[in-house]
Amino acid sequence: MPFRKTYFEKLNDLLRVYFKAVPCGAVSVTVKAYGKEFHLNKVLEVGQELITFAYYDEEKSTKLAEGKGEAMAWPALTLPYEVIESVEFDPGITRKGWKTSMGFKVTG
């Protein structure tokens, strides 16, 4: 069964349920599509047929000037929901060999 818009509209609720069951404090969210893994930084838009999100990729990122809010500019990708193979929640906020912390944290 393919992913749909409603799954991503409820992503924050799913993360809250996960944090309640697994009180790890932070989690990385990995979207698998086209046989590749994309580690979500931020969901930018949940459209009717497409989702657009920024994702962690050290090679494609750019450091931003200090004092402008975000420290890094991450690449973004738009995918149709039907190509998404899986969504994984992974406790922890770093990846082996990465210099940058990543992931979603419990808020509110």
Image (spheres, rainbow, N blue to C red):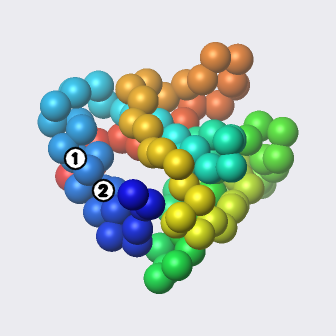
Looking at the rendered structure, the kind of residue marked 1 is Arg
Residue at coordinates 58% horizontally, 44% vertically from top-left? 32
Residue found 73% across the figure and 41% down from its top? 57
Compared to residue 37, the image places residue 68 above or below, namely: below
Kindly indicate whether the residue at mark 1 contacts the one at mark 2 (C-beta within 8 angstroms): yes
**Name of the residue lying farthest toward the left:** 20
- The residue singled out by tag 1 in the image is 16
Q: Quadrant of residue 38?
A: top right
Q: Which residue is mark 2?
A: 12
Q: Secondary structure at mark 2?
A: helix
Amino acid bearing label 2: Asn
Task: Give the class, few, some or many, for how many residues have Cα within 10 Å of label 2's Cα (few <14, many ≥20).
Answer: few
The answer to whether residue 86 is above or below residue 22 is: below
Which residue, as the protein is rendered here, is positioned at the far bottom? 48
Where disc 1 sits, the SS reads: helix
Residue 29 placement (x, y as % from top left): 46, 42
Residue displayed at 44% across by 60% down: 2
Residue 42 relative to residue 66: left or right:
left
Give the answer, above or below, for where 16 lies relative to 77: above
Residue 94 picture location, percent across and down: 55, 25
Q: How many marks?
A: 2
The front one of 93 and 8 is 8
Alpha carbon distance from label 2 to label 1: 6 Å
Quarter in which the N terminus is drawn = bottom left
Residue 48 horizontal/vertical position (percent): 47, 82
Percent x, y of residue 54: 63, 57
Residue 13 in sight in this render: yes
Which label number is shown at residue 64?
none
Which residue appears at 69% of the width and 25% of the height?
99
Frontmost residue, 28 versus 107: 28
Reply above or below: 96 against 72. above
